Amino acid sequence: MALFDSQLPIVIVILLILLSQSMKIVREYERVVIFRLGRYSGVKGPGLFFIIPIIDRVQLIDLRVVTIDVQKQVVITRDNVTVDVDAVIYYRVMDPAKAVIQVENYRVATALLSQTTLRDVLGQIDLDDLLSKREELNLKLQAILDRHTDPWGIKVTAVTLRDVSLPESMMRAIAKQAEAEREKRSRIILADGELQASKTMAEAAALYQHAPIAIKLRELQTLAEIARERNLIVVTSGADVGSTTGIVAGIQRAVEETGRGESRA
């Protein structure tokens, strides 16, 4: 009995150590995959749970969204243009058991898969599509990565192409192309304006043909406008040259008298 009493503190210490090792607490966003004697036993968490010390082995998995910053990848597009592309990939673990059992290191595997998929997909499109259809490419990359990582228990939530770096020579070529495109549009607009003006002039000529006096009134209006600039105009037409010259002289004289009156005032 005395021997038992002397060993009781040791037994209590051993029991406390075993209890502390068997008791586990994980956070809300964490799960623990348990292996008992090397075999998969289950997933525990969140909160408090117990394991069998020495027999059970645990591996902690974070369920929060993980961000992968894919470093710049040298990509040759389908039209043989070399560009540097980097992206950001967001994923999370949906099945902790698969993330541990099906792949050795799901973080490294997902990062390397992202790099190779980025090069493969962007190498199959033209440069113009790479610059103008980023949203479609993001969805395509996400679908491919999600399909490949699904057996690992991983869900790719988003893929974003962050930057596309072009060589200096290619940037100059694109600038020239844009300038040529703007010049093309300006010429088309100018030609369209000339076409509309010619149609309007043709309609006006038809109206003048039916009302000859209208062309005479238009001529006098033009002379009055020119006379405001105090210029001497000589007009020759099918009409009476004398009468036309008299009208011009009268307009010129009226403009000069108006100018002298303003200078006296």
Image (spheres, rainbow, N blue to C red):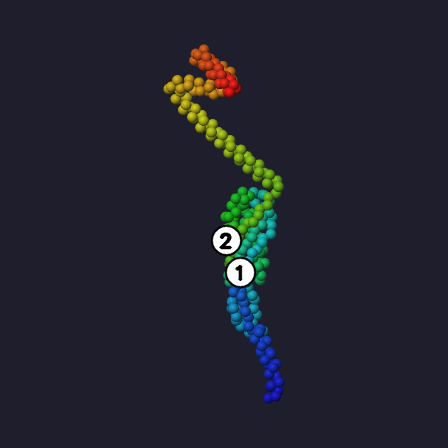
Would you identify the image quadrant in which residue 81 lies? top right
User: Is residue 37 at all visible to an observer of this figure?
Assistant: no
Considering only order in the chain, which callout, 2 or 1, is on the residue closer to the N terminus?
A: 1
Q: Residue at x 46, y 19 (%)?
A: 224
- Compared to 180, does 112 lie above or below? below
Toward the bottom, the furthest residue is 1
Image position, residue 238 (x, y; %): 44, 13
| Residue identified by numbered label 2 | 143
Callout 1, which amino acid?
Arg
Pair 1/2: label in front = 1
How far, Cα to Cα, is label 1 from label 2? Answer: 20 Å
Asked whether 63 or 2 is in front, the reply is 2
Kindly state the secondary structure of the residue where label 1 is placed: loop
Q: Which mark is residue 208?
A: none
- Secondary element under disc 2, as helix, strand or loop, is helix
Identity of the residue drawn at 51% across and 32% down: 186
Amino acid residing under circle 2: Ala
Location of residue 147 in the rendering, given as x and y in whole percent from the top left corner? 50, 56
Q: Residue at x 37, y 19 (%)?
A: 210
What is the x, y in percent for residue 68? 57, 55
Residue neighbourhood size for the residue with mark 2, other residues' Cα within 10 Å, grouped as few (<14), some (14–19), many (≥20): some
The quarter holding residue 10 reads: bottom right
Closer-to-camera residue (13/74)? 13
Percent across and percent down for residue 257 are 49, 16
Give the label on residue 64, or none: 1
Say if mark 1 contacts mark 2, CB within 8 Å. Answer: no
Q: Is residue 64 positioned above or below 16 on the image? A: above
Q: Quadrant of residue 127?
A: top right
- Crowding at dot 1, Cα within 10 Å, few <14 / some 14-19 / many 20+, comes out as few
